[in-house]
Image: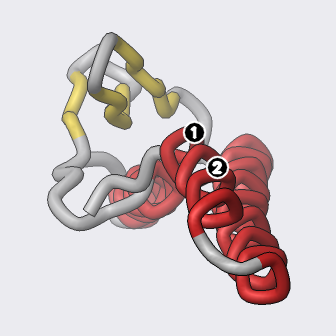
Amino acid sequence: MTIDINKLRKASKAVYLAVEKPVADELSQMLSNAADELEIDLMQAIDDAACDLPDGYSINLGVENGAAWVSLKRPDGQTEDIDSADMTLSEQVKQAAAIATEEAEKGGF
């Protein structure tokens, strides 16, 4: 499942406008916190990968209108798109890093 942080923030505002103020405040804050957590999780996943990724590997984030994806580039230049079905971008970054680490520990792919 892909979660669009901007849509989550817009939903937060829509909920705020649609229900009574006390409930709206609480729901709006919950949605805003969820969006913040997703952003922080992605930043942490990127930071972890930058520190731990084996030499020669790189993780690339692709973005176009309506889509975003993660791919792993190996030392020989081959790339592998990370299966994004039901995964957030941060989960995809973590998966790419795990694949690279596993391959490097086994002596290559």
Quadrant in which the N terminus appears: bottom left
Closer-to-camera residue (2/71)? 2
Spot occupied by residue 95 in the image (x, y as percentages of width and height): 39, 61
Q: What residue sits right under mark 1 in the picture? A: 6
Q: Identify the residue at horizontal 37%, vertical 36% (top origin).
A: 70
Q: Which residue is drawn at 46% across and 26% down?
A: 61
SS class, disc 2? helix
Q: For the residues labelled 2 and 1, say whether their Cβ atoms are less than 8 Å apart.
A: yes
Residue 82 image position (x, y, % from top left): 24, 46
Front residue of 55/13: it is: 13
Kindly identify which numbered label has been placed on residue 9: 2
Name the residue: 32% across, 13% down. Answer: 65
x and y percentages locating residue 40 in the rendered image: 78, 58
Q: Which element type, helix, strand or loop, lies under badge 1?
A: helix
Instruction: Work out whether residue 92 or residue 99 is closer to the camera in this orientation and state it.
Output: 92
**What whole-number distance in Å separates the C-alpha atoms at marks 2 and 1?**
5 Å
The amino acid type found where label 2 is placed reads Arg
Frontmost residue, 45 versus 105: 45
Q: Can residue 57 be seen from the camera position used here? A: no
Q: In this view, does 14 lie above or below 55?
A: below
Residue drawn at (83%, 86%), measured in percent from left and top?
22
What amino acid type is highlighted by mark number 1? Asn
> Are there few (<14), some (14-19), or many (20+) residues within 10 Å of tag 2?
some
**How busy is the neighbourhood of tag 1: few (under 14 within 10 Å), some, or many (20 plus)?**
few
Q: Quadrant of residue 99?
A: bottom left
Question: How many callouts does the rendering have?
Answer: 2
Q: Where is residue 102 in the image (x, y as percent from the top left)?
A: 39, 65
| Residue 59 placement, left or right of 9 | left
